Image (spheres, rainbow, N blue to C red):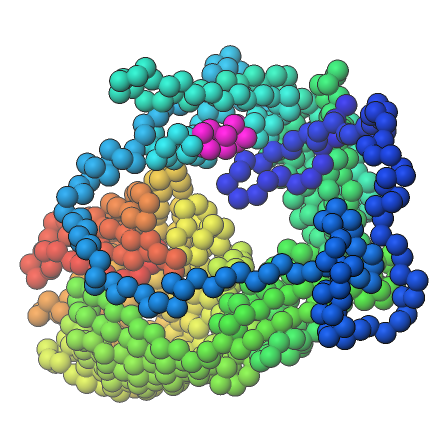
Amino acid sequence: MFLVCGAAPAFAQPPSIAPSTSPTPAHPPAPQDEGPIIPDQEFDAAIPPIDTNPNAPMGSIADWEKAQKSPQVQGKTATTPPAIGTTEPLPPPPVNDPDIDKPLTPLNSFDVEPFDDSRYTEADEAKSTNLNYSFRIEGLDKLDDRSTVAPISGDAIKDQFNSLSSLKSGKGKAVNGAMINARMTEDQQLLTDILSGQGYFDASVRGSLQLPAEGSKDPVAVILDTVPGPRYGLGAIAFDAPAVIPPDLISRAFVPKPGEPIVADRILAAEANIAVVLPENGYPFTKVGQRDIALDATTRTGDYTLPVDPGARSSFGDMIIGGKKPVFKPDHIRTLARFKKGQLYDSRKVDDLRKALVATGLLSTVSVQPQPTGTPVGDGTDYADLLVQQEAGPARSLSGQAGYGTGQGIKVEGSWTHRNFFPPEGALIGTATLGTQEQGATATFRRSNAGRRDRTVELSLGALHSNFDAYEAYTGRLAGRISYDSTPIWQKRWTYSYGFELLGTNEQDYDFASAELRRRTFYVLALPGQVTFDTSNSLLDPTRGYRLSAKISPEASLGSGGQIYARSLFEATGYYPATDSIVLAGRARIGMINGVAREEIAPSRRYYGGGGGSVRGFGYQELGPKDPEDRPIGGRSTVEAAAEVRYRFGNYGVVGFIDGGQVYTSSIPKFDDWRFGVGIGGRFYTNFGPMRLDVATPLNRQPGESRVSVYISIGQAF
């Protein structure tokens, strides 16, 4: 029986669990008695006498030199050891070589021919340094264990070997035979480790070299002759650990079962899983010890024992702040945490807290570590405080984006943000828009995680000039909003927002009564609210699931008389993965304005169709009813639908799509006279979402409509 101890080798070596060598006998046999080397009397005589007065003061150097000239010292033979306290004569000093004092010969006096490296070619280098070799592994062709849990074959062993082999990486070339032999020796151990990692603990690998015949150009043949031996399976599995709650917590986390092959990868993964599962279930201070596997060559099994120290079962305690430049106080960190003091410790919630702290963008470094307190909670657990080490990062940032859309022209936006102008997480944002058809500026105050994780309070003040075919407007806007949002860290099923908008806008549109353009001023108070239900698997690039959203905005307008009406918009999107690389996506949208005539609604508050986020193939706001000059006039209802086939390969993608829809002057959509556009798009996928380029054309194009529309932006169309 052998004992297997220790962790697997690191770095490029494959994981393996190798048996230790046989122990050395405790009492080796004594050598035969061959008698003393020298007689005892001679040995005793050779020992110098002990100084009779070891405490006497030391003599001077002059006394020592005088003693060297005494006849007693000079007359001693070399075979007689001097007594302690006496001295021996020093050998005479060497005679000085007279050439030592001569100056060195100047270098320019030597006749040296400079090295001509032009005579040394690459062919000479290859001829002088390259020794060709080949290698092969014998003895693995019949290895084929079709175990249900961990099947293995000789070809799989060879594939793993080739990925790590020194002989393979040398590409059949070496400087000399010693290098070939060194690589062969290294690969012998590598192949042994690979087989051991698959449970073949008795495997042997013998390397040999076959030299080519004299004068032959054949390479040196390296042969690794392998005898795998039997494959060992797991015997009894035991854990040296105190009782935990629940009792099977450790054994349930250890996936390998008795009878299955002892595979290093599975053993190491199971041990790592114990170190993960226990902290997720109230044991933050778990320590996994060194495994022992006792191999039995008779039964070809190994009894596995793993010491585990779970530490104290713990519940969440207090927040402790650390770091040179902390940003957040304990109260705000508790706002970000998705757990309360006294709840059972769960390392997943600690990881979530760390990610939430990183997502604030205010920290350059952050860590969250449990600290034992020994203070009982009263339910069988102890409090574990969390030490939050944090250092402030840059709070200010500049950002920008640019896009183009037919009907919208070119638009560039830039923003300056101070993310902690009003701590904690009170941001001040300045935004400027410059485009061919839009120009404006906005100042925004935004507090993130306001009293609750992912709740945002926002207040903004802005001015905007818009000049589209449908209308021209000069607008001032004061708006506030409270929202509960999804984030990439925590995507929620239900989200919502509500707030207010106060608009003062001077707008120009076409008046059918006077058959000319007119300019009016509107004052609008709106109370928009939105609810979204989301089952998709991603915010930025969903591939499965669906989303449903409803937005309702009661509004009061002053301008051409007082008007009270309601704007509503309902949308559904769905995503289905047809294959690993193809996703089918669809969208439907219905919008309505009830309680007011179209002419009495500010042109910028009406519904329009067409554009990159609406019906592609048509320019921005191009779809729908028009005036006599073919300018869009907007409507009170709209209906849209879209379907896409998204094909992704690596970081790139191709999309084919068809969009359809219409805008109506009635308050209820009629679902007739649909217009369609078809097109193709390209995607470049980044870590912040796909960059989109779509090109589309309308079907049954009408006079005045664009032949081709181009849309460039960030994110999918829906």
Of residues 215 and 548, the one nearer the viewer is: 215
Question: Vertically, is 438 above or below 273?
Answer: below
In the displayed orientation, state which residue is furthest to the front. Answer: 71
| Image spot of residue 594 (x, y percent) | 36, 68
Left or right side of 551 for 44: right
What residue is drawn where x is 25% and y is 69%?
402
Work out whether residue 76 or residue 132 is closer to the camera in this orientation and state it. Answer: 76
Q: How many marks?
A: 0
Q: Where 189 sits versus 546, above or below? A: above
Give the residue drawn at x 12%, y 49%: 700
Residue 668 seen anywhere in this rendered image of the structure: no
Given residues 293 and 381, the one toward you in this image is: 293
| Residue 442 vertical position relative to residue 334 in the rendered view, above or below | below
Q: Is residue 15 above or below residue 346?
A: above
Quadrant holding the C terminus: bottom left
Q: Nearer the viewer, residue 646 or 268?
A: 268
Rendered location of residue 626, percent (x, y): 15, 66
Q: Residue furthest left?
A: 703
Q: Position of residue 88 (x, y in %)?
A: 73, 59
Residue that protrudes farthest toward the right in the picture: 52
Q: Is residue 386 left or right of residue 157?
A: right
Which quadrant of the view contains residue 516? Answer: bottom left
Residue 462 highlighted magenta (yes or no): no
> Which SS does the magenta portion mostly show?
helix
Q: Quadrant of the N terminus?
A: top right
Tell me if I can see residue 106 in this picture: yes
- 8 sits to left or right of 408: right
User: Residue 272: x percent and y percent?
Assistant: 65, 44
Residue stretch in magenta: 181-191
Residue drawn at x 17%, y 75% as measured from the top left: 436
Which residue appears at 51% of the width and 12% of the height? 142
